[in-house]
Amino acid sequence: MRAAETRDHKEQIRIIDNAGSAYAALGDTREAIKLHERALVMARETHRPRDECTALHNLGRRHFALGNVRRAIELHQQALVLARQTGILQIECETLYDLAIAFGLLKDVGVAIRYAESALKIALATESPLADVIVATMGKWRRKNASSHRTPKSYPTGLKRVKERQRKKN
């Protein structure tokens, strides 16, 4: 495949995937899924693992929005593998957090906490604003499940760092 063709495929995949995100923002989740699926097929056909990762991540979010939690988990787990292989830390962090939320909804708080801890480590290392959200979520789980689950190891450190960052902003 020529370089120009590769660039064209890359742009087409991203346009289609972004259109899916736009439809999701407008509330048309089913149309968003169709577009993300189309982007996924194109990414796989053209051997573009980074675009495949993004499409899988977006599909997971759309299925989650429709209440298809188990399908969302499957898609997020596939995206996580590709995010790690390709080094896309932002999607790795977001996907870990999405998995944490999904497992939390399924009442598997132990698994949810493990995913959240992994997400928090990346969020703190990359100074992602998602760290604030992860710490808040872990705090809720901690309060709800104080007697039945351990306090997440990274929670106190994450909480301290988030508070320090907030003080610096003010």
Image (cartoon, rainbow, N blue to C red):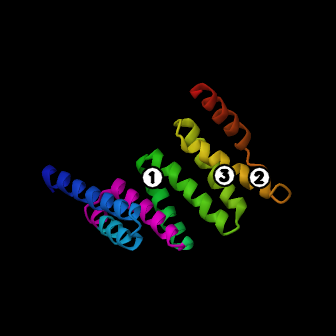
> Percent from the top left, x then y, of residue 53?
40, 57
Farthest right residue in view: 147
> Percent from the top left, x then y, of residue 154?
70, 42
Find the magenta span and give its range: 42-68
Q: Which mark is residue 142?
A: 2
At mark 2, the secondary structure is helix
Q: N-terminal of the two: label 1 or label 3?
A: 1
Q: Which mark is residue 83?
A: 1
Q: Which mark is residue 137?
A: 3
Which quarter of the picture shows residue 62?
bottom left
> Percent from the top left, x then y, of residue 77?
51, 62
Mark 1 and mark 3: span between their CA atoms? 23 Å
Which quarter of the picture shows residue 40?
bottom left
Q: N-terminal of the two: label 2 or label 1?
A: 1
- The reply to whether dot 1 and dot 3 touch (C-beta < 8 Å) is no
Relative placement, left or right, of 64 versus 24 is right
* Dot in front, 2 or 1: 2
**Residue 63 vertical placement versus 84 (above, below):** below
Question: Mark 2: few, some, or many residues within 10 Å (few <14, many ≥20)?
Answer: some
Question: Mark 3: few, some, or many residues within 10 Å (few <14, many ≥20)?
Answer: some
